[in-house]
Amino acid sequence: MKYKLIGESTPNMPWQDKPSDLRLPIWRYKDNPIINRHPVEGVARIFNSSVIPYEGKFIGVFRGDTFTTLPKLFLGRSDDGINWIFDKEPIKITNEKGETEEAHYSYDPRLIKIEDTYYIIWCTDFHGPTLGLAFTKDFKTFTRLPYPVLPYNRNGVLFPRKINGMYKLMSRPSDTGHTPFGDMFISESPDMKYWGNHRHLMSKSNIQWWEALKIGGGANPIETSEGWLVFYHGVTNTCNGFVYSIGGAILDINDPSIVLYRSKLYMLTPEEEYEERGFVPNVCFPCATLQNADGRIAIYYGAADSYVALAFTDLDTAIDFIKQNSP
Ligand code: BMA
């Protein structure tokens, strides 16, 4: 192993070995998708969802599109990270006074543990699409924090620890609709309440067509010996609609606004039936990873806005690919 995991290791994470005929650095789980349509009563599709290790097992916050097509957040639990059992009711999030604040819609959640607290960041409605932020200590009560950004913004990813005393947030400012532009920015906060010192992080590409329309955050950054390993999504526009692929970059460990390497090539793109065909065709949308000290990485991604799928890579394969294909 050339590169080392510095962040939390999850020994019992799901895994399948690298196939011998690998073309790209990420390989799919053979029994994909792991979450099919109608996974729970009243929910048509679960996708774009985030999972973490919890008490020796796994817990996740899932985007469930209901029969009105409005998305809500659902809690799910799993013994093995593959088979999931979901709560029947969406997560109830209260404000600091304990009053329920029903959001019109909630989607693309990311779940992360920072110190002894679990945070959810997702896209919700606040006079237009904006990031919502909430925390829990026990997965029973969930409390809202102030909106970290102004409207409009639909893609937020937190870092798993403070860096130089500051929490860090990657996000993608947008407009009210299917944003025809989009770069990623990074902001910081001393307390998860006041966010500022905004920096530009990465632009969509004028050269690489797979990420020419917009880019946006994906899984929580992974702390490694080479820097923060980031899987994000890049979008191209075709005469048949948008195509969402998975890309990778490595950010400086002490100042993640510095991009050290970024792959010109996508690392995974829709090629399987469950990625190419669904409610929204041609979407691979990464939202979470699990990793361990052996360098194994499991990537959870939404497929065609219809399913959750699983794929694998390892630190050496992913980091070497990003470095070798960095401009
Ligand atoms: C984006 C988000 C994602 C979705 C994607 C493709 O703008 O809404 O949740 O997966 O579009 O529909």
Image (cartoon, grey):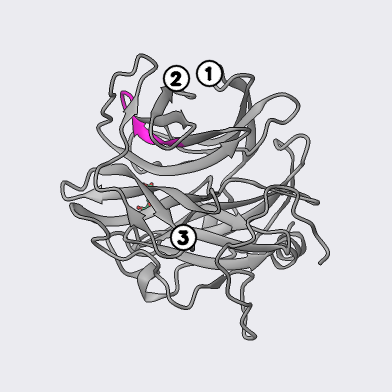
Q: Where is residue 282 in the image (x, y as percent from the top left)?
A: 39, 64
- The Cα atoms of the two marked residues, 3 and 2, are separated by 33 Å
Camera sees residue 151: no
Disc 3 residue type (three-letter): Asp
Is disc 1's CB within 8 Å of ligand 1? Answer: no
Per the image, is 74 magenta?
no
Q: Is residue 147 above or below residue 277?
A: above
Q: Of the residues under marks 3 and 1, which one precedes in the sequence?
A: 3
Camera sees residue 321: yes
Q: Mark 2 points at which residue?
A: 146
Does the CB distance between marks 2 and 1 fall below 8 Å?
yes
Could you say whether the residue bearing mark 2 is in a helix, strand or loop? loop
Q: Quadrant of residue 21?
A: bottom right
| Viewer-side label of 3, 1 | 3
Q: Where is residue 118 in the image (x, y as percent from the top left)?
A: 52, 35
Could you say whether the residue bearing mark 1 is in a helix, strand or loop? loop
- Please identify the quadrant where the N terminus is shown: bottom right
Q: Which mark is residue 131?
A: none
Q: Name the residue under label 3.
A: 79
Q: What stretch is highlighted in magenta?
A: 121-128
Furthest toward the right, the residue is 2
Q: Mark 1 points at which residue?
A: 193
Residue sitting at 39 percent across and 16 percent down? 96
Residue sitting at 42 percent across and 75 percent down? 272
Residue sitting at 79 percent across and 57 percent down? 4
Q: How crowded is mark 3: few (under 14 residues within 10 Å), some or many (20 or more)?
A: some
Q: Is residue 118 above or below residue 34?
A: above
**103 to the left or right of 222:** left
